[in-house]
Image (cartoon, rainbow, N blue to C red):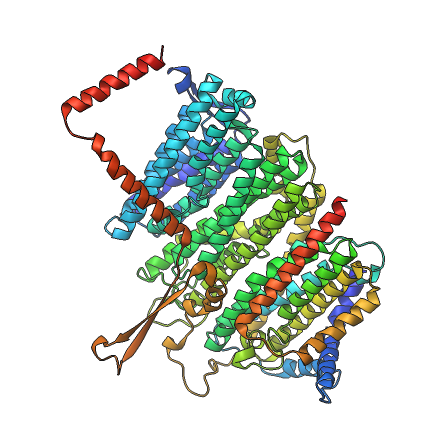
Amino acid sequence: MRVRRTLASLFLAAVGVAAAAFAVLPPTTSIVTSSVFARYLSLEFVVTPLARPFLCFLAIGAIAVAIWNLKRGRADSGIALAFFCAAMVGVLLAQSAFAFLLCWESMSLISILIVASEHERKSVRRAAFAYAFVSQLGALALAIGFAILAVHAGSGSFSAIAAAATSLAPAARVAATVAVLLGFGSKAGLVPLQFWLPRAHPAAPANASALLSGVMLEIALYALVLSCFTLVAPVGVIAGTLLFLSGLAGALVGGLAAAAESELKRLLAYSSIEHIGVMVSALGLAVCASVLGFPALATLALLAMLFHALNHTALKTLLFLASGTVVERMHHVTDLDRLRGLGSVALKRSAPWILVGCVAAASLPPSNAFVSEWLVLHGFIGATLSGNGALVAIGVLGLFALLLGGGLAAAAFLKLFGLAFAGEPTSSHERPERFDASVAALALLALLVLALGIFPLPVLHAMLAIAAGTIGAPAVRFDGTLTNAAHLATFAAIPVALALLYWWYALRLQRKQDGVWACGSSLPARASYSATALTKPLRRIFAFALFPERQRALFPAESSDFPTHVRYAVSTRDLTNEAARFVAALAQRFVRRLRIVQSGRMRAYIAYAAAAVALALVLGR
Amino acid sequence: MTTVQMLVILLCAPLLQGVLALLRARLSGRPGPPLLQPYRDLAKFMRKHARAGRSDSAIGFAAAGFALGSAIAILLLLPNMFVLGRAYAPFDIVALVFFFALGRAATVFAALDTGSSFSAMAVGREIAFAAIIEAPFLLALLAARTVPVSALLAGASLFIVLLFESARVPVDNQETHYELTMIHEGMLLEYAGPVFATWQYCAQLRQAAMLVLVAYTLAAGGISPVLSSIVVVAALPMVEAFQAKMRVFDVPQLATAATLLAVAALGIDTLGGLR
């Protein structure tokens, strides 16, 4: 068993190392170029500058998950994850429509299988079905979009498509843009196509969720950048504004839902929607700014997006892996209302690193996400100062929504760590956690988070070149902004230093154990505050969007005049989810009507085939 | 010059607290505490035994260091009051807002680490208010640039943020920790000794920094720096003396007002800039 586990982990790590190796290969190395099929079906794989950072993200995620898997998770789950990562490497290297679709579809299918891996539970089956549905619909849109582009360019190669993109007819451009935005947006969890994400990501085992949230969302983002700036470039202000608005909605919806959520993994999934919202709104700003003639602003926004993608990979992989440790140590209890004081016994060694992850997910200093959020917000401030009416509006809206969404997400993570990890444990019969491979994986990711937060400059410079190249901006220099970002990181070192000083002081001190103040009596564990209670003010303030409802059940039910105990439950509603359900119901009714054509009689099918042949002959003449 | 300003604030933040407390007491007809009382309190806390609700946790202590560090970072990022009257110098408003948020987050961690329900109740309110006050904070700082009217509106918006940030009356009450007014004090109920002194000192530093920001914004609108400082220091106890504590769930309306003021200020500022 141990051998299998080690081999599976090695296999996954090897894919990660391969991704890292591709990332550092010299520019424009063609790895496989085979045109044995027709020119539309050529398979081309090239390492492009834009793909390099994403290959690095993939490597980080894969290697961290592999290390974690040495100790926790299903023994052989590394193998499926390795194939999943290999498909993602393929997506990043693919430079022709057919190769891209092939890798994209294998990535989707493998991820659907991984999501469904605990299919004994009904909720998992339903989540996997919703994900499969959205994913296949997205793939269909993508195939149509690529077909339009490839037919126009006369070749399936991305270089030919990019060269021909400027001469697209308006109608074809609109159709292709809509198709690729739908295809990639559904995978990235853009609002309103995000409803599957908070179900599918938590349904998967933790190591798979880490890769789904920490890497696959970034791959979808890569595809969005690729289509906006290469395949259908220039996409225009309207598409940019739509991306921006969808990102804002994601930041607000994700932040609010995360703040109200008390299930650990769903909270993390909602936070992914929030982070993707931040990145996509920055991408929308980059598109609008580059079309309106502000290349420097566009480069800054794209740089911020790229850096935030790296930071999201590190922090979300860390947090989802941590959720896996919680699942194993706490016997599948992931309800924040029931988890208490994990940091003192059950997750004693992991907790400090999880704290780093929570600080990063809340975008607070000294984490890496603080630096990238700072860059994104400076991008929007730049937009308000640009003097262009549309950009000013985008800037003000963006600042407002990102700060509100960010504040809500911060509340969610303060709740997560403060309740589940800090404080007094409710049960003390757990053995204390010891240092092992799973803790090492968390520690490595947390150190990466801190290192990128305190020394961001080298990475920022490397990404600046890539962002400027993607926008096609003439060598923009942001020495001022970037040096400011570096200074900022040194400011962030002040709190860290003082915290260490106080910690040292606390360790030296003989502290008296005298418990919390309880009006002179002793407090039972049940009296500790719950996550649901903690977010009551937020639910009340945002009642217009959350629709909180309280249910009260009296026990025993038959003699409710003298109940022995009362159970309360609070539920909130996710409007985007309900909208999706409504659309699905409508679609189902429509499809039922359509069933008439499937009569089951042979004559009808022969007639269909004959009609299809006739149509093909008429059209192909 | 920034260093000089930082040192002045580091030394005088408790004095400012004393002035505000004295003014508030006098306005409501009480003799009030001595001016130097905050210094005496800090000295008293320093002599006392450090304790926290939980004996084996160091998070609450480390969080105090985090809060103090973030307060110092805020002081380093503040615009310089000594060069007021000259052109409005831009400063890093995003970082400033985030370091304020960091200090708040540290307090929340410390409060939840004690495991006390009383502190957690305060935390619930704090994180809700923190989430809705960040956007007006940044937008108001962004709006105060050149146009006098927009600077005044932004100053008004920042003043509301100041009420949140320094736990003042319509939002919270510094002097008590009853159920109705227990946001900031409630969170620190379990702490004592030098660590509690640190928390109190941090709150004073952050309050002084917020006052500098409001005064600076008003001064950018054309009021002389000295006058704007006096106006702000006088206005705070007046609001406290003549206002009743708001119901907790009415407080968000105050944040909405701050947001609207900030957006209006930003709109006027942008139109002024476009012309």
Vertical placement of residue A486 versus A493, above or below: above
Vertical placement of residue A376 versus A232, above or below: below
Picture quadrant where residue A463 is located: top right
B85 or A514, nearer to the observer:
B85
- Picture coordinates of residue B172, whole percent (x, y): 59, 75
Tell me the quadrant of the picture where the C terminus of chain A can be found: top left
B86 or A215, nearer to the observer:
B86
Q: Is residue A350 visible?
A: no
* Picture residue at 43% right of the left edge, 28% below the top: A145
- Picture coordinates of residue A223, whole percent (x, y): 48, 34
Q: Is residue A21 visible?
A: yes
* Picture residue at 46% right of the left edge, 16% below the top: A154
On the picture, is A227 further left or further right than A595? right
On the picture, is A68 further left or further right than A177? left
* Picture residue at 69% right of the left edge, 76% below the top: B239
- Picture coordinates of residue A286, whole percent (x, y): 60, 38
Vertical placement of residue A174 versus A436, above or below: above
- Picture coordinates of residue B156, whole percent (x, y): 70, 64
